[in-house]
Image (cartoon, helix red, strand yellow):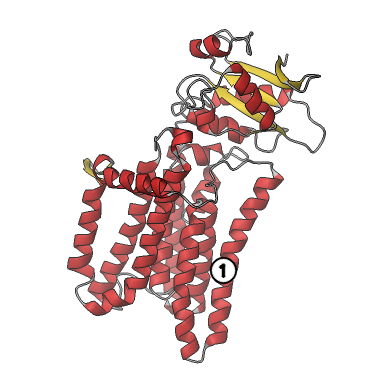
Amino acid sequence: MLLFVPYYLTTNDPDYAFYYESLYVDAPAGLLCGYLCWQAAKDCYEDWFAAAAFAITLAALTLTKDFGVLFGGLCLAGSLLYTRRAARQKKLRPALIKAGTAAAALAAAYLSWQVLMRVYHVVNYNTVTATLPTGQALFSSFAYFCSSLISVDLSLAAISLPLGTYLLLLLLLYALLVYRGRGALKADLPFIALRVIGYAGYFFAYVMMFRDDIAGGVYPSITRYMAAMLLCETYVFLMAWMRASRRENRFLHRPFPALKPAGKAAAALLTAVLLLLSVSTVRSFWKYDGGVAWDAEQAAGLVEEGVTMPEGETADLWLVIGGDAWENSLLHHRIYFDLVGTSARVKTYILETNITQSGQAYTPDTFLEALQSGGYEYVLLVYGDDELLEEFGDLFPELIPYETDFLLYRVATENDGSVSLAAVE
């Protein structure tokens, strides 16, 4: 509730670009992931209230971020330990119903998102090719991880420390405050292993997605992804520390069904107050849009006016942006979302927006071949610069660097089967 309600109340429907472009989703997603991991580790099927909370958290994390499927599946697998214990206690049927409900929540959340993307003709280009990585790719990924322990800095208040320092500090605190006896460590070991698998899987999936032929070894979002995982583990640590120090009388924590009527009313009131505070906090995030909202609206408006497609069909659009692709990623996101539900969709990833620096060594001829093989119907050109004019001026004769900010071209098929670009007036 504290995650979804504030975002819902502060988002101007249907402009969901604010939700994505802010990138603030990673921090709450990391905390939500920590809550899910903690639920799995403390018996998420101990009663029906705990089982319902676990199912809702599974669905919420899956809807919030792609890694929700990974961690949700791992936590669901870990929860089967409690199902096995229930079977030994001759309570298999209710345990299976609880586990089935959780699995259904995860599947429903994932499938609903997939259905929505298809309904609105959205292209999800953040996907990892389902092939086994080579030994060289795994080695390169692991080498980058080791180097990131020193090179990637994370901030806490006014202090900035390398990622590796935070990880060592967490391990030290676990050893000194939580796992001082073998019993607690043995009980939690399966869930520790599942979290380690989740963190490693998330990291390697990200690094392999941004493989050299796409990004040239650049990993622009790795810091915030690592921070999300660190928040997840920090949440689990704090809860485990409170459990270890307070035993079963955990600090300020009782299951909602165990509260008296007055306690339930107080809990509901406190939740309402926290929601209001969250709304006001999240609302402040939207004050800065990167200065691209107006340009994105102009570009999207040009596409909506100029694209003509048969009813029910959606045109695939190659978005070309001059200048640095990473610096213009926010503009890419805004145009991408502004076109959701229209007659056109952006089908190119951020790094493909600058065809002069994409690493693919495009020439005018090979770019046309890429348009043809990819099934593109239109090209939208934004922020044309001198380099784009010098290398692709023959394809975009209307381009005047830094003056013609928005140009739309139709991909026309010639009689000989080749393609050309025709400006849309």
Across and down, in percent, residue 55 comes to 53, 67
62 vs 170, left or right, is right
Crowd class of label 1 (few under 14; some 14 to 19; many from 20; radius 10 Å):
some
Q: Which residue is painted at 30% across and 73% down in the image?
A: 250
Within the image, what quadrant is residue 243 found in? Answer: bottom left
Residue furthest toward the left? 176
Q: Which residue is painted at 44% across and 78% down in the image?
A: 81
Across and down, in percent, residue 183 comes to 26, 80
Q: Is residue 179 above or below residue 16?
A: below
Within the image, what quadrant is residue 374 found in? Answer: top right
Under circle 1, the secondary element is: helix
Q: Which residue is mark 1?
A: 103
Between residue 253 and residue 70, name the one nearer to us.
70
Across and down, in percent, residue 425 comes to 73, 13
Q: Which residue is painted at 53% across and 9% down in the image?
A: 390
Between residue 255 and residue 370, name the one nearer to us.
370
Within the image, what quadrant is residue 348 found in? Answer: top right
Q: Is residue 27 visible?
A: no
Across and down, in percent, residue 110 comes to 59, 57
The three-letter code of the residue at mark 1 reads: Ala
Q: Is residue 248 above or below residue 357?
A: below
Between residue 257 and residue 3, name the one nearer to us.
3
Q: Is residue 138 above or below residue 78?
A: above
Between residue 260 and residue 168, name the one nearer to us.
168
Q: Is residue 53 above or below residue 166?
A: below
Residue furthest toward the front? 135
